[in-house]
Amino acid sequence: MNPTTPDHKPAILALSDGTVVRGRAIGITGTTGGELCFNTSMTGYQEIFTDPSYYGQLMMMTYPHIGNYGTMSRDDEARRVMIAGLIVRSFSDDYSNPIADGSLQEYLERNNVVGISGVDTRMLVRHIRTKGVMNAVISSETTDGNELVEKAKNWDNMVGLELATKVTRSEAQTIPSDGPYRIAMMDYGVKQNIINNFVQRGCTLRVFPAETPAEEVMAWEADGYFFSNGPGDPNASSRYGLPVVEAAKKSGKPLFGICLGHQLMALSEDIPVKKMFVGHRGANQPVMNLNTGLVEISTQNHGFAVDEDKIDDTKVDVTHINLNDRTIEGLRFKNFPGMSVQYHPEASPGPHDSSYLFDSFMEMVEQSAGSKEKSPSMKG
């Protein structure tokens, strides 16, 4: 499908703890850096690369073969690639997929992504799992490993870093449907498939930029409020996030949060959020629904989590936990009609075990609105 094989230059990956590995360049020639994380998904690399929650991070794929089915525009979760750089074991210059738009190399070049292949990703994953998450730098512009280690040491730390405003939309947008309910959606880096899930359920959406004042959001008179996923430290997003959450709580309407939105809802109840040692990223994370006892295999992407040691059971019920490390994956709020999950029920990529959560929220919206049929056009 892709008859030409590019001549890849040498490249270096340098970690802030002094680890240096060498490979060959993929994407464009350049230097980039960020927090080094890994994803365990076997497929769905394009959806991962365009997930806004990965903004500012170097993505290392644990599945060894990346690029073999090319890229397709329909698989993008955002309008551009969000990862800061890419690390893979075996990169496919050629692809075999009759419906692909082009190769992954062409896609990375078009999106100005710096990457490295031909490195021992298994060793690197084991290293991170032992030492904890750290910053790193990829470069195909220099062969000086010591220089790149120093760059990695001086790269901005994810703790305290506000990034949602880097990926949010620039102005509010209405997305219509033929259903009766209106959902106000805060865009901290919302994935396209989250929007799709609401529209498929008959919701007209008003999607607001991250820093929209609470008064503007409340003026739209929604039937429910959704707080999206997004990158960075949730504590740093509280400046603009918490006022909207508090206003939505006072409205008496249902609230739903995913990932960063989940964390902001917890923070609004004075439940702390902490940085994780490694984080969860992949499409194979086991989560138990404590209400049903059923286990869901889920898509996840987070480096922060609600502190399980600081839960206040007068304010929340824990509804979901991660079976690998017992971290909190879901909450139900007692002082207002709200639910939230740390993981991604919209999938893309990943299993669809958790899509029922959108239905659960819609049931809350329907109960709150009563039996009265409301047309989206009634409120402009």
Image (cartoon, rainbow, N blue to C red):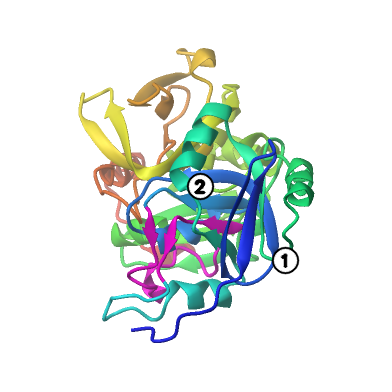
Q: Front-most of 18 and 232?
A: 18
Query: Alpha-carbon neighbours of circle 1 within 10 Å: few (<14), some, or many (≥20)?
Result: some
Which quadrant of the view contains residue 101?
bottom left
Q: Front-most of 110 and 29?
A: 29
Q: Which residue is drawn at 37% across and 73% down?
A: 70
Residue 99 visible at all: yes
Secondary element at image label 2: loop
Query: Alpha-carbon neighbours of circle 2 within 10 Å: few (<14), some, or many (≥20)?
Result: many
Q: Which residue is drawn at 72% across and 66% down?
A: 141
Q: In x, y percent, where is residue 322? A: 36, 27
Left or right of 12? Residue 175 is left
Q: In x, y percent, where is residue 67? A: 39, 67
Which numbered mark, 2 or 1, is in the foreground of this view? 1
Q: Residue furthest bottom?
A: 3
Residue type, mark 2 in image:
Asn
Whether residue 71 is in magenta: the answer is: yes
Secondary element at image label 1: loop
> Which disc, if any, is residue 229?
2
Q: Please, what is the dominant secondary structure of the magenta stretch?
A: loop
Q: Mark 2 or mark 1: name the one nearer the start of the chain.
A: 1
Residue type, mark 1 in image:
Glu
Q: Residue at x 40, y 27 (%)?
A: 332
> Which residue, given by chain and number where applicable, does mark 1 sit on?
141
Q: Front-most of 327 and 264?
A: 327
Magenta stretch? 64-92
Image quarter of the N terminus: bottom left
Which quadrant of the view contains residue 253?
top left
Q: Front-most of 257 and 86?
A: 86
Above/below status of 45 relative to 72 = above
